[in-house]
Amino acid sequence: MAKRIFITATNTDIGKTYTTKLLLKEFASRGVSVGVIKPIETGVVKGHCPDGSELLNLLKELNAKCALLEIDDIVPIQYELPAAPFVASKNKILEIQKLDQAIAKLENLCDLLFIEGAGGLYVPIDENYMMVDLIAHYKASALLVTHCSLGCINDTLLSQRVLDEYKIPYVVAFNCRENDTGFKDVSEPYFLQSEKKVLKVQDDIDTLCDVLYNL
């Protein structure tokens, strides 16, 4: 079984795919055989998975063993409506065995598997599964990607509490964008009180890889 790292976030459009791609490139540059899967993607139009396609194209560049994979291997479950899987599927029961099989196939091709979630931790998949339940099901460690705009303290702490309750080992990374100019003065001081260092996705990718690999 490959080492599993689940990429989650405090909400949608926080930067999970961007972060996953950086991690794939960095680990591959270190000689690690990488793999990636996005178990569920919504907003799929005519078979085009925006996030999944980006991940698949990059993976084929980084791991020759994955050259023959297709989009259904990377995104086993796809829905057209851009909504929570519970809504997009009209409350269809999650085909967990389909995901298990897809992950098993990828793990035969890599030593480190990234699993990218959809939305945040409490995004409902069906009546029994929230997104966080997939992390627990696959016994993965997690990278919590959070934002740097006003409100990130509340959003980050709430997500951390969920991960703590599930006893999931995790690291927090801040995805600061160009318009997040107030982070240093408005939010970062709080996190610096409790953390030795605030890890940022783009600036600290080396450190993130080191910490994640040792979780």
Image: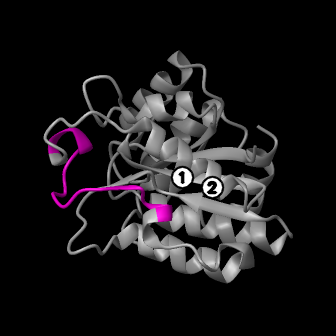
Q: Position of residue 188 (x, y in %)?
A: 52, 46
Q: How is the image coloured?
A: one colour
Compared to 90, does 207 lie above or below? below
**162 or 195: nearer the viewer:** 162
Disc number at residue 102? 1
**Quick one: label 2, few (<14), some, or many (20+) residues within 10 Å?**
few
**50 or 126: nearer the viewer:** 126
Q: Does the magenta run of residues contain 156?
A: no
Q: CA distance from mark 2 to mark 1?
A: 5 Å
**Quick one: label 1, few (<14), some, or many (20+) residues within 10 Å?**
some
Q: Which residues are magenta?
A: 73-87
- Tell me if label 2 and label 1 are in contact, CB under 8 Å: yes
Give, as a three-letter code, the residue at label 2. Answer: Lys
- For the C terminus, which image quadrant? top right
Looking at the image, residue 45 sits to the left or right of residue 134; the answer is: left
Q: What residue is shown with label 2?
A: 105
Looking at the image, residue 47 sits to the left or right of residue 72; the answer is: left
